[in-house]
Image: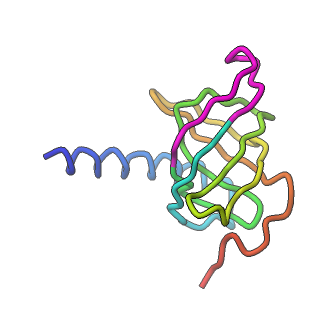
Amino acid sequence: MAHSATATLQTAQFNRVAELARFFPEATPVRIPVQIEVRNNSRNGGGALQESTIIEFGTSREVLFSCSTHLEFGDVVHLRNVDGSLDTEASVVAVQYQPGRILVAARFLNSVPNWIVKS
């Protein structure tokens, strides 16, 4: 029964991020687990916040995901996947607040070649 609830929650989060992805015509579903870190966030006393999440959609320049960390336009997040093939920073360019989750679009600060490949 717990697996069913988890799958339903993940599907709901994906659908919410999909709504945000409408504003990014090049966005492709990717489902990449990442660790996000927000450093020197004035809302947390200047410390670092970390959270595991999933990049649900991506373009060659942006990533879209949901999180519980309070992010705002212009915040810089560090993104890293498990094998380190994605290890970069991105600036938040769009935020939608939902009950219990925040939907985020962030644009890479530097070029990240070949991080997303369309077939």
Question: Residue reaching furthest front?
Answer: 83
The segment highlighted magenta reads 38-53
From the viewer's perspective, is residue 71 above or below residue 62? above
Give the percent coordinates (x, y) of residue 82: 56, 58
Q: Residue at x 76, y 42 (%)?
A: 93
Colour style of the rendered protein structure? rainbow
Question: Residue reaching furthest left?
Answer: 1
Give the percent coordinates (x, y) of residue 60: 74, 67
Give the percent coordinates (x, y) of residue 18: 52, 54
Q: Is residue 10 left or right of residue 109?
A: left
Between 53 and 58, the one nearer to me in the picture: 53
Between 87 and 77, the one nearer to me in the picture: 87
Give the percent coordinates (x, y) of residue 57: 58, 59
Question: Residue reaching furthest right?
Answer: 110
Q: Residue at x 18, y 44 (%)?
A: 2
From the viewer's perspective, is residue 114 above or below residue 5? below
Between 90 and 100, the one nearer to me in the picture: 90
Q: Residue at x 86, y 57 (%)?
A: 110
Q: Is residue 42 magenta?
A: yes
